[in-house]
Amino acid sequence: MAETPAAVWLVLPTYDEAENVEAMVAAVRGVLPESRRVLVVDDNSPDGTGEIADRLAVEHADVEVLHRPRKEGLGPAYLAGFRRALAGGAELVLEMDCDFSHDPAYLPRMLDAARNADLVLGRSAAAAAPMPGSCWGSPYATSPAASSAFAARCWRRSISTRSTRAATPFRSR
């Protein structure tokens, strides 16, 4: 990758991800540029995910934890993470699940694609249906709160700001 944006944030919502969070943070730190920030958004996981994330934040200056007092669902977790990333100066905001249904190895490819796009979608390993055309774009994504079961995403700040203002919070079931 040639030129990398100065402020790349990855929003990583967690709930009961104690088995995955440390490995996921290590994996994304290994593939993202040094200008990265990894934001773990934990919804008071009863399995200790938040405490593990806190330890990682102490060990790594580029890791931050946003603790939420209760489980509110994936969409609101992404929105809270987006707001924090934008307030922190993010130019590009990546989002992905912590259960490895999104492969961190594809994050550099998503950042490369973001040079010429405002929104980049990366297909989830769990998505069984073939995606028409390129597996790196779709005209159907409308907000950061859209289901993550389909794709990891990379949003440019300009559209992230509009999307988080316009998005209606919802609870995932």
Image: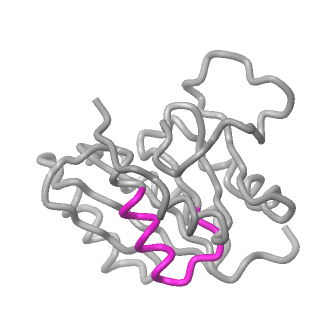
Placement of 57 over or under 42, stated as above or below: below
**142 or 26, which lies in front?**
142
Q: Please tell me whether the stretch drawn in magenta is mainly helix, strand or loop.
A: helix
Residue 89 occupies quadrant: bottom right
User: For the image shown, how many numbered marks are present on the structure?
Assistant: 0
Q: Is residue 90 magenta?
A: yes
Q: Quadrant of the C terminus?
A: top left
Q: Residue furthest top?
A: 129
Q: Is residue 16 magenta?
A: no
**11 or 83, which lies in front?**
83
Left or right: where 38 falls relative to 153: left
Q: Residue at x 68, y 42 (%)?
A: 122
Left or right: where 60 falls relative to 44: right
Placement of 170 over or under 94, stated as above or below: above
Placement of 86 over or under 153, stated as above or below: below
Q: Residue at x 78, y 34 (%)?
A: 135
Residue 150 occupies quadrant: top right
Placement of 149 over or under 88, stated as above or below: above
Q: Position of residue 19 (x, y in %)?
A: 30, 44
Q: Residue at x 67, y 36 (%)?
A: 140
Left or right: where 80 falls relative to 7: left
Give the residues drawn in magenta, as a range: 79-93
Q: Position of residue 117 (x, y in %)?
A: 81, 58
Q: Position of residue 106 (x, y in %)?
A: 69, 48
**26 or 117, which lies in front?**
117
Q: Position of residue 49 (x, y in %)?
A: 23, 54
